Image (tube, rainbow, N blue to C red):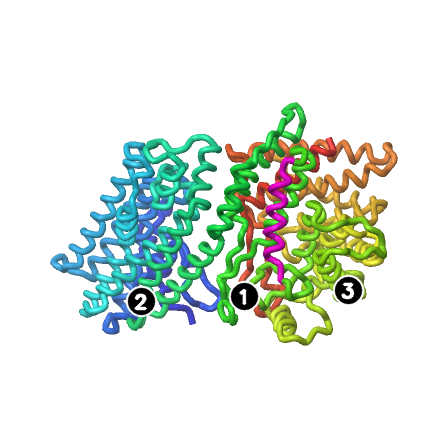
Amino acid sequence: MDHPAFATTDRVAELQSGWPAFVRLTPTEFPQTSDGTLPLDGPNIYGFHPYLFAGAFSAVDPAHLAQLSVSAWLFASAIFAVDHSLDDDQTESTGSPLDLMANQFEGYRSLARLFPGYSPFWDVLQARLADYAEVAGEQHAYVTGRRPLADFPYEKAEHWATAKSALATVTVAALGELAAEPGPVAELTRSVRAYSVALQFLDDIRDWRQDLSGMRPSYPLAEALSAAGFATARQGPGTPEEVERVGRALYFGGAAARIMKLAGEQVALAMEAARGLGVDDWLHHLEQVAAAVRGMAAQLPDDAAARKRGQAASGLSVRMRVDRSRAWQPLAGLSLRWLLGQWRLGFPDATHVMVFPGMAEPGPHLGDVFSRAVIANVLADADRVLAGGQLAPVLAAEADHLLSRRRADEPGLWSYFPELPDLACDADDLAEALRLLVRVGRIGGQDGQDAQPADRLGQALESALDLALVGCARPDGSFDTWLIPPDEQAPWAQRQRAAAAQLWGEGADAEVVANLLDAVSDYRPERYQDALGRGADYLLGLQDAEGWWSSGWYHGRLYGTYRCLRAIRRVRPDATGVARRAQDYLLAIQSADGSWSNASGESDVLGTSLALLALAEAHRMDAGLAAACAEARTEARTEAVLRARDYLRDQAGPDGSYASEPFIMMSPQRAPGMKQPLAFGGRSLTTALVCQAALAWEELS
């Protein structure tokens, strides 16, 4: 049965009918969850506040609670509109002044039905709105440059956070008066205020770049600005190098770690104040916030790692001569410079943070093995094509990080979430790790069929490859994604098999098979010649008649098409019919603006980059044909890729980066126990794939 809060949708719809259609009160319905529980993320929580705290007020009338929920949602919509206006965010989603007027009117009318004019509740509401207005006025002084962003001490940050929690504290006061139970009000108010500080600090760490760009003050930003030498600046850093300096101060100067510790203390205070009051939903939400704080704190470098990376970053100087007359070098060079700036910060957006409720070790769990290895392999391409070996310290540091994340006691070596014991090591992570380690010279390659690696790392990788390509091989030439030894009966293996069957899904995935075949082709192809041939035959049989391959772990068809085409080109370079069908498919679905759509149906940067990478593989396979056979295909392909290049140029930010787009995806259809899709992407991943596509075509131009 759905939570009673969802009935607010119907009540708001009734109010909406009294206004013209172009005047919007709120979203037409609350987002639904699969089990009917409250979706306590984002702005949804504000409309549910009365129900979150109602357990502390046993005498409150359910009808009054429902009416208060309507008021809370209406006021939340109005305050969000005011926030957007103060931040100069005037997108369509922020609503119009008429929307604001209607929400305020209906919100006050709804409250008037609960509280007479002489009620002390109105004094509480006025005082909290006055606090909010005071903060809004102070914020304007920072935005306009009348006050430096670094002038924002902890006390002011705490006051702002609690002032912005007006909706929650007013809701608590309203419930106390409606139920005539003032007892829980003080403790719940204390809980809300501590929670607001913790949540504000968490958001500030995540959004420091946006806050800096919009001249919005925050405590983490103030600390970083002061440490970076901008204590008195009223306009903030202007150049990309200055912004990077602020980021280094935040992450590697210790400010972020200190502030996350404060956030953890505040959320602990919030939980302590709320315990024993019967507010289970609120406590559950606080636990989620506490997990997010722990996850963010775990992503931050410890003191030793921060010093090491900071020293390496400060000593790195890359000089690239970008030939602007070349078709692809400017695009590759600009995106590479941004990626190097993110490397100096530790790629903060490349870590997938997840909590797995119900597991023995729910987390939060941090996954950065795959994403960091993907980015590092792009940097290795860039080092070869553009940087001439100058990125060796960067690649060495990334290899060290990768090795620090392996599971030394399991033969598969790398798992997407290394500390989640229910998740097995997998062939996809192994492929990216193998590719990077070969490129940086940590292990040898091309040693012949019978040669044995002399070092311990090489022996471990050989065992992992034997497990994947032999131990987990399937009769059709594929192999399992999960690297669990078939005969292993240790508790860890049984646990991982059960989790794979119930939660993750079993069997082979075409793009994972292709990725490992490609990586092995760089390592010791003679030793694994039989496995490479059988795997290529498997991939050849999976191509759709239209020319594409599907993906089991990624959004859309384009990643699978690129990966499979590349592996086939490495192992079966004469399979040109496969390349022709893939190219025909890609050219047929290219949009008029030169882009491709990966999954959403709309133009996107990630899909365009993946399509370009697939077309580069088709181009390489055509290179082996007689000129007359390949000429027509080459002409069509060249026109398509140049239009795609122009699209990517137009989508780049001023700093050379690209917006985050969904890349990794796990569909609930994979396994019976997976209730919701799991997706991940980031600016660093998107920008890296753009850089990789530009580098590929730079080499082919």
Q: Earlier in the sequence, mark 1 or mark 2?
A: 2
Q: Residue furthest left?
A: 118
Q: Residue at x 55, y 43 (%)?
A: 343
Q: Residue at x 42, y 67 (%)?
A: 37
Q: Is residue 294 left or right of residue 434?
A: left
Mark 2: which secondary structure?
A: helix
Residue 468's image quarter?
Answer: bottom right
According to the picture, the residue beneath numbered tag 1 turns out to be: 675
Q: Is residue 133 left or right of residue 264?
A: left
The x, y position of residue 125, in whole percent, is 20, 54
Determine contact: label 2, label 3, CB under 8 Å.
no
The x, y position of residue 284, in whole percent, is 39, 66
Above-or-below relation of 671 to 26: below
User: What is the CA distance from the residue labelled 1 to the residue labelled 2?
Assistant: 31 Å
Mark on residue 473?
3
Q: Residue at x 68, y 56 (%)?
A: 430
According to the picture, the residue beneath numbered tag 2 turns out to be: 272
Part of the protein shown in magenta = 390-407
The x, y position of residue 511, in whole percent, is 70, 54
Amino acid type, mark 2? Glu
Q: Split into 4 quadrants, where in the image is the N terminus? A: bottom left
Q: Is residue 11 magenta?
A: no
Above-or-below relation of 459 to 77: below
Q: Earlier in the sequence, mark 3 or mark 1?
A: 3
In this rendered view, identify the residue nearer to me: 556 or 30. 556
